[in-house]
Image (tube, rainbow, N blue to C red):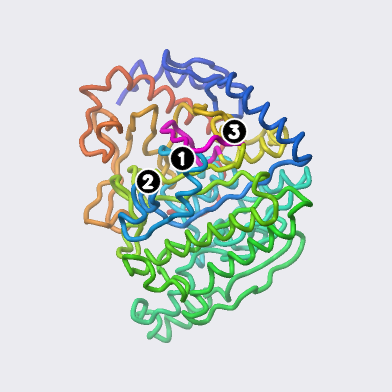
Amino acid sequence: MKKSILTVFLLALCWNMNAQKISIFDETVVEKENMEPAIPRPEQENIASQKLKDFSNRSKKKPNVLIFLVDDLGWGDIGCNGGGVAVGAPTPNVDKLAREGKRFTSFYSTPTCTSSRAALMTGRQPIRSGLTRPLLSGDKVTTNPWDVEVTQAKLLSSVGYKSALIGKWHIGEAENMLPHEVGFDYFYGLPAVQSDYTQFLVERQYSDMINNKELHDKAFQLQPEGLLMGRKGGGRSVGFEIKTIEELRQIDEKLKDESIKFIKENSGKNPFYLIHSFTAIHNDTYCGEDYIGKSPAAMPVKDAILQMDHIVGEIMQALKDSGELENTLVLFTSDNGANEDVFPDSGYHPWKGGKGTTWEGGVRVPLIAYWKDMIEPGQETNELIDLTDLYMVSLRLGGVMNQLPNNLYFDGIDQTSYLLAKDGRSKRQCVFLWNGTDFCAMRWKDYKVHFQVFDIKETRRNIDATNLSRIGTAPWCYNLNVDPKEMGSEGHRYFEWGIPAVNAFRMRHLATMKKYPNTDIGLGL
């Protein structure tokens, strides 16, 4: 089929990486060739800069960053997003962060955990790093992506930050791929995922492998020894052995203790960058002994949410007790949407689809930003923000934006002013949504536009029973203000005026991958 005149024109226009305006709707400015174009917000930038200057004069140090990263938590699991008590697990500590900070209702991640964590650690779309899908026990990569990528921890270390990732990693466990081998000062946690342990412990669920000696003996070689630990420049060791369900139940408490210890060790000394990465609420869900049956729902996943919330409260109290509360930007989020496939271990969201898809349920997740005396409390915003943006915010606060390499394209946008200015607005024009190596959808303003769609064949089978199909004559389009569940596309009838602009934004995005080629690490499907 011949390309339309419009498509040829857009391709030619987007090939010029310096093209400033590609549509009358394009609000962005290209400040640097290898950086995502951003919407200028000079007034709020001035406000943010002054706030940061005042902070520096007051504290005589750079700010800390603490990120709470929950596993598979749905947008609607927390009380401030309509969940909490209403769905059987109150979250008072997370809700307190929202009341005293800023809540972002249109924050986007990626459909799965490895790709989301890669986006957070690189500031780039996972398609660029090759970390496009969950790394599984036994996977072998042909290229170490961390030979190409640069973590925020590595850059921040150059200006005196101490960094730690405590909890789930899941972005490679081969040699030179764990956090302390790619820039973090300290790692304590899971190389991959919680179900790597349970598949050797829960006989009823995995009996076909456990009770088949030939299969078990081979698969057992993949079993992790326990929680690993390591320091920059050093090797790996087992920090906590996991051989029983009782030991498995202790993981999130062990992680909490390590994060509190890290905060205390650096209080009053070094600025720190800490990612506290929960095992909760990934399947298979086993909360701590003290939380069994304690949620109103008395279900394992709800008990785990209750425990997660308590841990957030304890770590926040540790920040306060250490005198670092006023010095710390706190971010709370989830790596992807709720995994409906693992019901009743699944979280909750009010959207269509779930983990593994680019419907809203797979990629629209909670985000709360809290910074005492720096972020005006009680704010809510529905403007766009992306997981890669958190990478850039961390670099801005550390003053190391100028250290980014020029040979890589960065999708993240510095949204510091969006966070710090009262009623600040987003600098992001579009969110681009990939699943694996497939470009599927994008969001522009309140419009969600799909170029490939997930056809879910069975209820709660977003991962295990879906087809990914190209759209037909017109992109599927939804105005999320009136159709947040993406129930009926109205693209060709009510959005013809916007399709050329959306297509121009899409083509410019894809053109960056011609000039800055993606890395193939050999994952295949």
Above or below, 161 against 386 in this view is below
Q: Nearer the viewer, residue 512 or 47?
A: 47
Q: Amino acid at mark 1?
A: Arg
- Secondary structure beneath dot 3 equals helix
Rendering quarter of residue 298: bottom left
Image coordinates of residue 373 in percent, x first then y, are 61, 38
Q: Amino acid at mark 2?
A: Asn
Q: Residues within 10 Å of mark 1 (few under 14, many from 20)?
A: many
User: Which residue is disc 3 drawn over?
Assistant: 416
Spot occupied by residue 260 in the image (x, y as percentages of width and height): 64, 61
* Residue type of the residue flagged with mark 3: Thr
Residue at the extreme top: 24
Circle 2 sits on which residue?
Answer: 81
Q: Which residues are magenta?
A: 374-389
Element type at mark 2: helix
Query: Between marks 1 and 3, how big is the CA–CA gap?
Result: 14 Å
Disc assigned to residue 473: none
Q: Earlier in the sequence, mark 1 or mark 3?
A: 1
Q: In the image, is residue 376 part of the stretch drawn in magenta?
A: yes
**Horizontal and vertical percent for residue 490?**
22, 28
User: 170 or 512, which lies in front?
Assistant: 170
- Secondary element under disc 1, as helix, strand or loop, is strand
Number of the label disc, if any, that sits on residue 103: 1
